[in-house]
Amino acid sequence: MPKKAAHVLVIDDEESIRDGCSQILARMGHQAESAGDGLAGLEMAKTGRFDLILLDIRMPKIDGLDILRTLKKELNIPSKVIIITGFGTIQLAVEAMRLGAGNFITKPFDAAELKKAVNDCLAGEACGMTPGERLSTIIGTSDYIEELKDTIRRVAKTDSTVLVTGESGTGKELVARTIHTLSTRSEKLFIPVDCSSLVQNLMESELFGHVKGAFSGATENREGRFQMADKGTLFLDEISNVPLEVQAKLLRALQEQEVPRVGSSVPEKVDVRLITATNRDLREEVRSGTFREDLFYRISVVPIHIRPLREHKSDITPIALHYFELFRTKHNSRAQRLSPEVVKSLAAYSWPGNIRELRNTIERLCVLCDNEEVTLSDILYYGQDTRAKAPVVDPFSGRMTLVDVEKEHIEKALQHFNYQINKTAQFLGIDRKTLRTKIRNYGIDVREEK
């Protein structure tokens, strides 16, 4: 519990909520005031005399988002804000966090939930910081996500080398970027490198640079990724793809903070914070002799493991709602809300592609849904297997098979992209050949193709 008593404002049109919050806050040792409507609450909040504001979203006269926008975007009031929301307005709560709220609690909440939110907020753990410090890009409300944010926050203060591990699609680069954003190097460049996409015989040049004439085709001096990231952060994704001969030079670059440009006998000094990532077991790679043991220990000073989405399922809904709001706006979608059945379906699915698959699924919904409410018949999980328990169509109709759903889904995508095969295949996450095969197998009419 914070040592200093706080001055808290509760803005909610429900008297029971105001009274309950005030009593809990008083027992915590804080001074609480309340307002029964948004306009009165806004006038009180404008004074800037409150350390914390508990703000309901749905209120008559003026809603919580407008109050928050006025306080944070127009008046720059420093008070920390916790949003109070019902299940039906969780999407709005996500928007509120973008506007400057630090956290939200959902009705009905108990005393323990309120106490934790208030304590975290006043301690600076959840709100009252800059958007970067709030780690707003790391979405979720589970204990695991809170622990991950805390680890990122602490690691960011150091220059230690970090190894991020986790399955494909779990957000390893996002974690690396967040560490950089919170670090003292944030004003300098963050340089990401996908080691799996680099041509092996050119990897040394890509990482360390080369001088003119170093090899056939080297017509001019060129900086490598290390030089580009000087004073900043270098992120090497899929580090296990670096060949052994380059690993030795990478180890020296880390130990000496100097890089051997290809074709030059004089190494160059660099000041780089290195973050690496992999979806493989590097210890097994060391045992098999494909990864240097000394390099493994050098890059894993601070290991961070990201759990697959199926191991923190309570975060699926807030992540899905975050992307739904994002893509609904981006694509000017007809879809305005997810039905309760869709929310349950998303939460039940195993997500083998993790957050990347969830993001892509939500974007497809926003592009292809024809109605204001997204229903089960709009969902198609690519890569769905027999372990997936989430239905893809309305179980009460019994009229559509999975094949029917996929055919309709492809037809909608083709129509949306004016029958352009390249754009449709890219959007669906498949190659042109696979899309043409499905078009042929399903007998889809593409006479309008351009």
Image: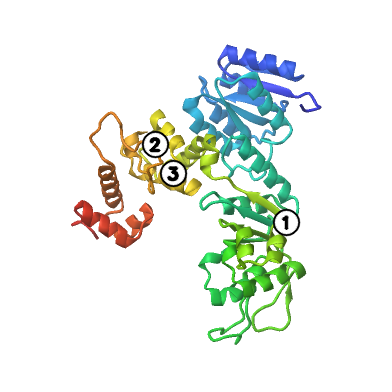
- The earlier-in-sequence mark between 1 and 3 is 1
Disc 2 residue type (three-letter): Ala
Query: Residue 28 placed where, x, y %?
Result: 74, 19
| In the image: residue 94, left or right of residue 275 | left
> Disc 1 to disc 2, how far (Cα)?
40 Å
Q: Residue at x 33, y 55 (%)?
A: 424
Q: Nearer the viewer, residue 26 or 309?
A: 309
User: In the structure shown, which secondary structural element does the residue marked by tag 2 occupy?
Assistant: loop
Q: Residue at x 39, y 36 (%)?
A: 390
Q: Nearer the viewer, residue 347 or 24?
A: 347
Q: Which residue is mark 1?
A: 301
| In the image: residue 106, left or right of residue 391 | right
Q: Which residue is mark 2?
A: 390
> Disc 1 to disc 3, how far (Cα)?
37 Å
Q: Are marks 1 and 2 in contact (CB under 8 Å)?
A: no
- The earlier-in-sequence mark between 1 and 2 is 1
Q: Which mark is residue 140?
A: none
Q: Which residue is mark 3?
A: 327
User: In the structure shown, which secondary structural element does the residue marked by tag 3 occupy?
Assistant: helix
Disc 1 residue type (three-letter): Val
Query: Residue 394 placed where, x, y %?
Result: 30, 32
- Residue 378, quarter of the rendered image: top left
